[in-house]
Amino acid sequence: MNDALIHAIASAIVRLSRRRAPGDPAYEDGVQQAYNQLVLYCLQHGEEPPASVPDLVRRVAGTPLGEAGYLVDAATCTPTQTCLEWARDAANVQAELFENAVIEEALAACRSARAPESYTAFRRLLISKPVLTAAELAALAGDIDLVPVLETVRKCYEPAPAAYRRDGAYQACGRCGCLLVPLSTGGYRCELDRCRADRAAVPVQEVPANLGVQQLRRPLRVFITSPGIAEIDLEARLRKLGLVPQMWPGFDAYDLRVLFPGGPVWAVDVKDWANPALLGKSITAGLRADPPYDKAFIVIPEYRFKVREDYARVVRHHLADDLCDRIEVCSDTAFIRQARREARREDAHA
């Protein structure tokens, strides 16, 4: 199956997952087009085509699409992170990426107010509070740093789905704070790959449904909260080395700016994609040059390398040639080792 067809199917599944009410249109054009393309592909290759759009979804839930892997989580019947990445990579959905629009709106508001601290507060909120009660959401109006982005913040959250509720309450993951998805077989499942990768038991946090539970919209949970947790973790580990990284400097020029006393400056973008090839192709430009730095890194959480030992090599293979010499790709563990060596070298020089 070619990439164009996988893009189309992934985009269709994401569109279907956004259906909220019985009165919503039966299928958007992109969904029907993806179905038609798959039927044609099956007929051309002597395979039995899906009988309907629901049949298409059932097939995708039960069968990995080659290198693309599973696009639907069979246990929760929701799009996987891999599915969201394939949909994100499709040219026909670039204009409708909700998370990009939200970030651009927040950046514009903070630049207009000349308030970089407001953008930092906004990013930390989306990372640390993927779930809020109605009272907590209303209380954000009292946070001075969030004043320029309050309207944007409100767009980021939506009422928690009734399907996630059991016995009058929601359960939140004790690691990432996102709502857990109830399973038909009993128990719960976190939707973030990073939490699924760590099988150690994590206490859940019960949130009563009568508090008006709100959660971040799915694209923000996957592409902002999940890598954001890795960003905050990296910040904490660098502070233990005696360094003071700047978070999202220059209105999000990149994720962390690491200044070694009397030495070099490193710039870091943290990425947490399931598919390293799609990640490599998505990096179309180097890190912004201002604020200036001496060395640039793309840093990936270590757990991704436990699934794919060749993760960094695949990313580099799909980077544009002019970027390979300008950006180092490594795990967060490898990055911290380099930072420790650099900090010791600077201490020795001092």
Image (cartoon, grey):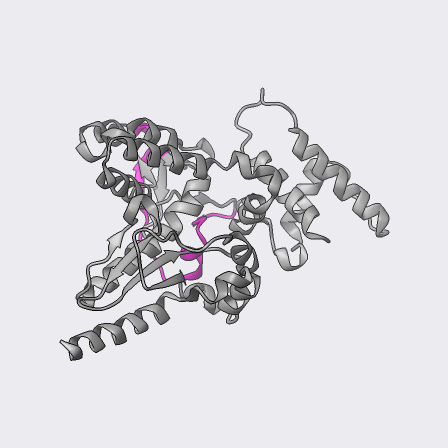
Task: Let me know if residue 328 appears in the view.
Answer: yes
| Outermost residue toward the left in this view | 350
Q: What quarter of the picture does the C terminus occupy?
A: bottom left
Please provide percent x and percent y for residue 93.
Answer: 58, 38
Q: In this view, does 24 lie above or below 169?
A: above
Across and down, in percent, residue 280 comes to: 53, 58
- Span highlighted in magenta in the image: 185-214
Residue 284: x %, y % from top left = 51, 52
Give yes or no for residue 192 being in the magenta stretch.
yes
The structure residue drawn at horizontal position 38% and vertical position 56%, both measured from the top left corner, is 269
* Placement of 183 over or under 212, stated as above or below: below
In the foreground, 46 or 328? 328
Residue closest to the eye, 140 or 22: 140
Q: Is residue 326 magenta?
A: no
Query: Which residue shows up at 57% across the image and 61% down it?
Result: 318
* Res 307 seen here: no
Quadrant of residue 104 in the image? top left
